[in-house]
Each structure stands twice: as C-alpha cells, then as structure tokens.
C-alpha cells in the first residue's frame, strides 16, 4: 500500500508522520483520519484553500487538478510549483511526501 510521509509542521504535526493509504482514498480524509488536523474550512468543497499542501514527492501519481482547483490555488498562502488542495486529491500508486504550509489564508486573515 502506498504511503504518505508528512513532514514536521510545528502545530499540525510536530514530529512528522508516515501513514499507509489505500489507492483512491481522499488525501485530506486520510490525513484527518490519522490525527493530522489540517484545516478544511469549506468542508472539502474546493472553495477555501485552507487545505493547501505541497506535494514534494510523488505528485505525478495524483489526479490532475481541475480548473476550479487551479483558480482557487492562486489565492492560497505561499503558493509554489508543488501546491495542491488536499481535498481534491486521490491517492495514487506512488508514495507521497507532503509538506503543510506554515500558514493558511485563515491564519493570515486572523493575524496569527
Ligand atoms: S477544504 Fe476548502 S478547498 Fe479544500
């Protein structure tokens, strides 16, 4: 079964973690089910960007982004070439390395 390695994040996942995830599983649901409380302000409707992650390895095995995800990503904090919205991702055959951005757009607007 492919794995997701989540790199350490000071608040969400201080030690980092590695989990096994069945192919076809929603990436955000796999993270949440394993105690990684990534934000998902729009309840996974592709409307908020708070579930933004960087796919540092294995991104080519994921489903391609739809136009809605690409448009929304432009508003995400800290956008880079590896950026995806985790609520839109289905686990592929390859292992993933995921980095959670330091901030979300919610945190920035709340002044954290
Ligand atoms: S949870 Fe809102 S865009 Fe993913």
Image: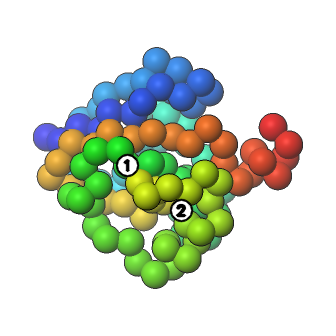
- Considering every residue shown, the one lying at the far right of the view is 111
- Considering every residue shown, the one lying at the far bottom of the view is 67
- Percent position (x, y) of residue 109? 82, 52
Q: Mark 1 — residue?
A: 55
- Percent position (x, y) of residue 52? 53, 53
In space, the residues marked 1 and 2 are separated at their CA atoms by 18 Å
Tell me if mark 2 has few (under 14), some (14-19) or many (20+) residues whose alpha carbon lies within 10 angstroms of its own: some
In the rendering, which numbered label is found on residue 82? none
Left or right: where 36 falls relative to 24: right
Mark 2: which secondary structure?
A: loop
Q: Is mark 2 within 8 Å of ligand 1?
A: yes
Mark 1: which secondary structure?
A: strand
For marks 1 and 2, the one nearer the N-term is 2
Residue 107's quadrant in the figure? top right
Residue 27 sits above or below residue 67 on the image:
above
Q: Mark 2 — residue?
A: 44
């Amino acid at each position: 079964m492919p794995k997701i390695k989540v790199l350490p994040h000071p608040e969400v996942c201080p030690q980092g973690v590695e989990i096994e995830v069945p192919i076809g599983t929603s990436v955000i649901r796999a993270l949440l089910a394993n105690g990684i409380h990534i934000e998902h302000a729009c309840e996974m409707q592709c409307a908020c960007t708070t579930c933004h992650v960087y796919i540092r390895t294995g991104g080519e095995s994921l489903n391609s982004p739809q136009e809605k995800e690409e448009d929304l990503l432009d508003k995400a904090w800290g956008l880079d070439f590896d950026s995806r919205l985790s609520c839109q991702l289905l686990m592929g055959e390859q292992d993933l390395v995921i980095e959670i951005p330091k901030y979300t757009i919610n945190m920035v607007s709340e002044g954290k």
